[in-house]
Image (cartoon, rainbow, N blue to C red):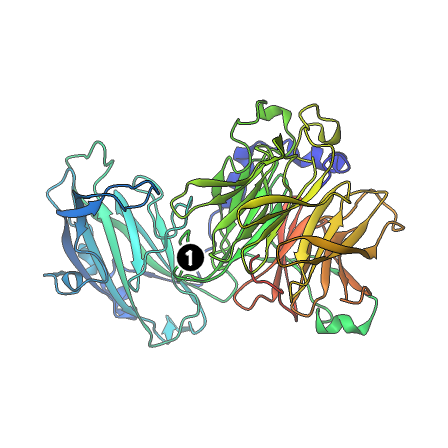
Amino acid sequence: MNRFALLSIAVAFCTSPVGQTVLAASRQSPPVPDSIIDLRSVSAAQLVGAQWRYLDAAIVEDTNRLAGPDNKPTGISTPTRNVSPRPGTDSFDNAPWIQVEPNQLEARKTAGKLAFGWYRLSLTVPETVRGRGVSGDMIVFDITADDYSEIWVDGVLTPVLGSSSNGLGSGWNAPNRVVVDANARPGSKHEIAVFVANAPLSAPPSNYIWIRSATLGFYKPGRLAGARPVETRITRKTTALDAILAPNTQAELLADGFAFTEGPVWVPRASEFRYGGGGNGGYLLFSDPNQNVIHRYDPQSGRVSIFRASSGYTGEAGAEISEYFQPGSNGLALDPQGRLTICEHGNRRVTRLEPNGTITVLADQDGGKRLNSPNDLIYRSDGTLFFTDPPFGLPKAFDDSRKELAYSGVYCVYNGQLRLASRELKAPNGLAFSPDERFLYVDNWEESRKVVLRYEVTPSGELVNQTTFFDMTSVPGEIALDGLKVDHGGNVFVSGPGGIWIISPAGEHLGTISIPELPANFAFGDDDGRSLYMTARTGLYRIRLETFGATSSR
């Protein structure tokens, strides 16, 4: 996105300090449930057949391997310690659990100081709660433990890198919540295990562990997410659009109050996913380059949290962050192994976030000269990476004295080697593959040349036989072309003047999606891939489609 063309639009919302936008987006109070059960009440707990049990946890001797040259446990074996018992083991299921009545959860447990314990809760989803049918509801477990808690649901702990709550303790004596069932089915059974620690851990107090509060909240479908319908204008150039976007479809505003949203990527449901969250469904990551953060949106709860701070600038570029308009990350993508890859504006590089939280630099120089400010990226299914490199992340863009390259390139990283694939465009921006990966589409953020180019791609990642796929230069306005994606039918979605343009594989304009704010970028998401998540200025939006993405998360 060319920030100078948007400066007058951006001033109004860029004056908000980062603390305000984060609080507004990520710490909003959840709505009141449609039905609630106090799990400390004997009569209320009976509504779900709740049975509480307790067991002291212990720190036991164990062994592990020291970190090897790869920073993984590949070194020599060494003594260490572990928690016992642990969910999913016979020792956990067969331990001498003590039954606890719901009205006895405030009874103090352990001997105090550095001490840990397990609370275990079995429940059955009822047909009704106080006369209201709960089939299809989302069930949320809320607990406040003294002093710190972690929640396992049906044998799974779902930590997500950088997140708090979602089953992990978010503070001292702080509430913790997790989704137990996203689509309640009467008669289904769930097992919740809560690990509680006396804290602070570095200065454990003389008191004990106990449960301050524990509830089950039942939410009607869609209520917890808090999505709000917004004015949506669909311009239909041909009835062929109906197979992509049904008539009268309306977009939703999911979250707002950001400085500027960009670079979304859908993280699919997968228990083995590198950064956690598997088992509770997929989620969306998106950048706020103005505020130097990556946000995480959970579509089940509607909660937005910070996934990664200092996402694109860490002070390595030799400039003060106050000089930058957009120092943070921009484009995000997952490689074929599910690892997050990040275009870092301020640091002027493309990096990969490893499962252990460390960073691997994939590209930062072209022939010994620093890249401009990588903008957007996409992976081919064999792991070959392509990205665009306009200078919009530099404080003065094209006129910045720190700009070392005389061009803005489209780059390819093939077998670990960086190659300049094209320097045809002044400001290459969004890019995406055709479904068969034969073609790469690249658009241009330039008012005097609003074009989408199409290249044939060789097996080694060379771009050949360039053609102009679509030209919007005659469309008035300063807004040029930004995000670009392709659906499984080969239709090209482009952020351009007025909204998201949908163009057939033959280059025919089928229609345009317009919402209250102009989308900078977008991504296909949800389990079926039929939701289009749109990062649009200060907000995050979603619209349901009849189609799905050519690539789910690349």
Q: Which residue is drawn at 84% across and 46% down?
A: 449
Q: Nearer the viewer, residue 277 or 73?
A: 73
Q: Which residue is drawn at 37% across and 76% down?
A: 186
Residue 446: image location, x then y, percent? 80, 42
Q: The disc labelled 1 sits on which kind of residue?
A: Phe
Instruction: Name the residue beneath numbered marker 1.
Output: 273
Looking at this rendering, what residue extends furthest in the right direction? 474
Neighbourhood count class around disc 1 (C-alpha, 10 Å): few under 14, some 14–19, many 20 upward: some
Residue 74: image location, x then y, percent? 27, 46
Q: SS of the residue at dot 1?
A: loop
Q: Nearer the viewer, residue 116 or 429?
A: 429
Work out whether residue 235 can be spotted.
no
Q: Quadrant of the C terminus?
A: bottom right
Q: Which of 225 and 269 is in front in this view?
A: 269
Quadrant in the rendering for residue 375 = top right
Q: Quadrant of the N terminus?
A: top right
Q: Nearer the viewer, residue 413 or 134?
A: 413
Left or right side of 210 for 475: right
- Say above or below: 97 vs 316: below
Q: Which residue is drawn at 77% across and 37% down?
A: 5
Q: Residue at x 30, y 57 (%)?
A: 152
Residue 514: image location, x then y, percent? 75, 56
